[in-house]
Image (cartoon, rainbow, N blue to C red):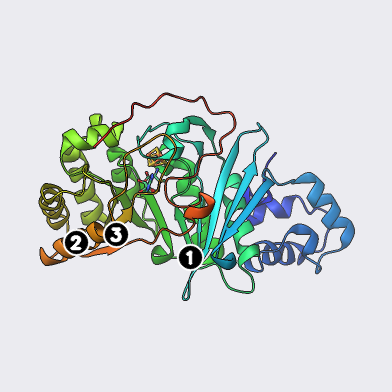
Amino acid sequence: MTSIYEYSREELASHLEGQPRYRVDQLWRGLWVDGLEVDDITTIPASLRTTLRERFPSPLALAHEVQSDHGATRKWVFRLENASTIETVLMRYDSRVTVCVSSQAGCAMGCTFCATGQAGFSGQLSVGQVLEQVMHAVRAAAPLRLSNVVFMGMGEPLANYAVTVDVIRRLHDYRGLSARHLTVSTVGVAPAIERLAREGLPLTLAVSLHAANNETRNELVPLNRRYPLERLHEACRTWLEVTGRRISFEWALIEGVNDTDQAITELARYAHSLGAHVNLIPLNPTPGYLVRGSSAQRVGEFRDALLGRGVNATVRNTRGRSIAAACGQLATVTNAKRRSIPLRRA
Ligand code: SAH
Ligand code: SF4
């Protein structure tokens, strides 16, 4: 099943043979500017809408929806044709509306504290499957305009590289989203960061650091054994030099693991050397990782200590925890192979 959002304007035109020339503009406008489903694009005749709907059925079926924060946070579970599921989260703030999309069904990276990593990998998503998540969010956000797209749902976007790049390009070209509104979060696939830097795409890069010494990071983020901190640093430096854009480091604060005074010193040095911003995430609970998140007090102290060392640091809120929609909690992959993850205790 190919999503209608996979087609360029020219490709869509070739599916509209026998129709007046302006038809493709109406369809394009309805899809990308107004964010409508084909059935709701009333500028085109009903019979054509039916044909298009049948020819391009959505590759995502909505299986479940949950809400919290009085509807300001909404999580959708979508079922794919192969029966695995992915999750998408919409967050409405005072000044922006953000969708957090999945780039893969599950994730093969196995980060110990992440529910997606605990559940394992069940498949790549296509360009259409990622764009359908965004456009579903566009419709749900209306009449507000969806302002931000973050690749922070299930999966490692740089392990589905071509799709991630294509989706960003289209969101920029077709929806007018720019670097401030598009964020890719990566666990640190160093060569892919370097390649991405050279694509000339409008995007903000977030790197999930979580530890600034190799021993701790090896345990939290197994990919660190392949691309240790020194190699990641090189890639971040390339990103800075090529794009001129500041990186942000994500750091989920885990009690006794990466919230110590030593961790502050290590992180401050690493972040400072790259002029990076640090985004602290209080650890969200997941079933397979029993170590606790840092207390609210420690989170505050940690941030203040970074600020005191001249590192720009903010704390991310824990939106969506009550509906398992917060960072690292997305996991209802029904057919992923469950892997046993050794529990680490503080
Ligand atoms: N694979 C990418 C993007 C998806 S994860 C990446 O790892 O960056 C999005 C963010 O949620 C990452 O920073 C990740 O480290 C963080 N995260 C994962 N599990 C978490 C948890 N239990 N609590 C808080 N943040 C978590
Ligand atoms: Fe995958 Fe990111 Fe979770 Fe690690 S934190 S397992 S890379 S989704």
On screen, residue 113 versus residue 163, left or right, reads left
Q: Residues within 10 Å of mark 3 (few under 14, many from 20)?
A: few
Residue 243 appears at what percent x and percent y? 28, 58
- Confirm if mark 1 falls within 8 A of ligand 1: no
- Residue denoted by label 3: 296
Are the residues at dot 1 and dot 2 in contact (C-beta closer than 8 Å)? no
- Residue denoted by label 1: 177
On screen, residue 198 versus residue 39, left or right, reads left
Q: Is residue 92 above or below residue 197?
A: below
Which residue appears at 42% of the width and 35% of the height? 117
Farthest right residue? 47
The amino acid pointed to by label 1 is Leu
Which residue appears at 61% of the width and 34% of the height? 84
On screen, residue 36 versus residue 94, left or right, reads right
Ligand 2 in which quarter: top left
Q: Is residue 225 above or below residue 230?
A: above
Quarter of the rendering containing residue 234: top left
- Residue denoted by label 2: 301
Disc number for residue 126: none
In this view, the mark in front (3 or 1): 3
For numbered disc 2, what is the local secondary structure? Answer: helix
**Is the N terminus in the top left, top right, bottom left or bottom right quadrant?**
top right
Q: Earlier in the sequence, mark 3 or mark 1?
A: 1
